[in-house]
Amino acid sequence: MFQFEETSQAGNNWTIIVPFNQELNKSVKGELSSLTGMVTDYVSQFENYWKVNKQLEECGLLMFVIGRDDVESYTIIPFIDVFKRLEANKKLILAMRNKVNIMIYGYDDDERELYQIPEVRKWMTTVLENIDSWGFFLNMDHNLSGINILHLCTRDYKILGRKGDQFKVDFSPKEFKKSLDILFDGLNKFCMRHGISQKINEEQSQKIAECLLQEKIELKK
C-alpha cells in the first residue's frame, strides 16, 4: 500500500517512486484481495492535492508568517506540519529547495529586538529542534534569511552597543558552532531520509555556513 501524498500528477495519470526493494508479484495477490472493500473514488482529493503541489513547485519564494498570537500561545504543531507537507514526495522536495523564508510579525510596537523577547526565543528554540529540513528549504541568499533569525533567537549573545534603534550584537565562536552543528546534523538526517545526493548536501552545507558567518566558505571534502 502507499500514501497518496507520495504521488505526482503526470498528464491524465499519476506516478509514484517505488523503492528497488519493493516488488509486486503473484505472491501478494491474496494479501491485496483481503484489503480491498467497497470502491471509493478519491480522484477529486488527488487532483486538489496535486494542484497545491504544482502551485508550490512553481512559486518563487514561499513566505511563512508567524503571528504574535501564535508565538504567545506557543502554537507549534501547525508550523511543523507545514514543513512536513513540503516533504510529500521527492519531486516537491527538490522543487522547494532554497524557496522558503520565515518572519514573525506583531512586535512592531515593542522596543525590543525579536531575539530579546523570551516568548519568541522559546518558540524559535522549539521549532529549531523539531524541524530538520531548515538547511534544505530555507532561502539563504540574503541577510534576512530564516537561518539568521533562527540563530539570533536561539543562541546566547552580547550587546556591544547601540546606534539609534539598532543594536550591535556579538556571538562567540562557540555559539556559531552550536547553530552550525544543529543545522548540519538536521540536513544530514533530512538528505538521508529522502535519498538526496551528497553533492546537494554539500552545496546546502556551504550555503548554511556562508549565510551564518557572512563570508565565503570552502568546506573540506
Image (cartoon, grey):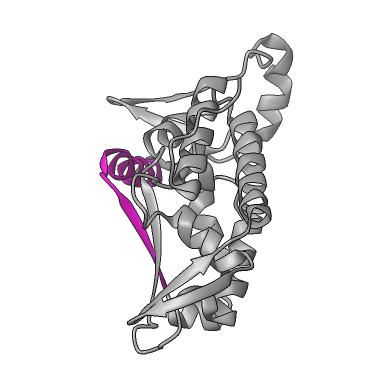
Q: Is residue 42 visible?
A: yes
Viewer-nearest residue: 109 or 130: 109
Give the percent coordinates (x, y) of residue 13: 34, 24
- Quarter of the image where one finds residue 168: bottom left
Left or right of 187 on screen, residue 5: left
Name the residue rendered at 27%, 24% in the picture.
11
Give the percent coordinates (x, y) of residue 185: 67, 41
Viewer-nearest residue: 204 or 220: 220
Above or below, 34 relative to 150: above
Whether residue 59 is in magenta: the answer is yes
Above or below, 70 relative to 100: below
Name the residue rendered at 59%, 25% in the picture.
195
Give the percent coordinates (x, y) of residue 56: 33, 44
Query: Which quarter of the figure is the N terminus placed in?
Result: top right
Whether residue 183 is in magenta: the answer is no
Viewer-nearest residue: 176 or 86: 176
Name the residue rendered at 39%, 39% in the picture.
96
Q: Is residue 136 visible?
A: no
Above or below, 218 relative to 143: above
Start-end of magenta stretch:
45-66
- Quarter of the image where one finds residue 194: top right
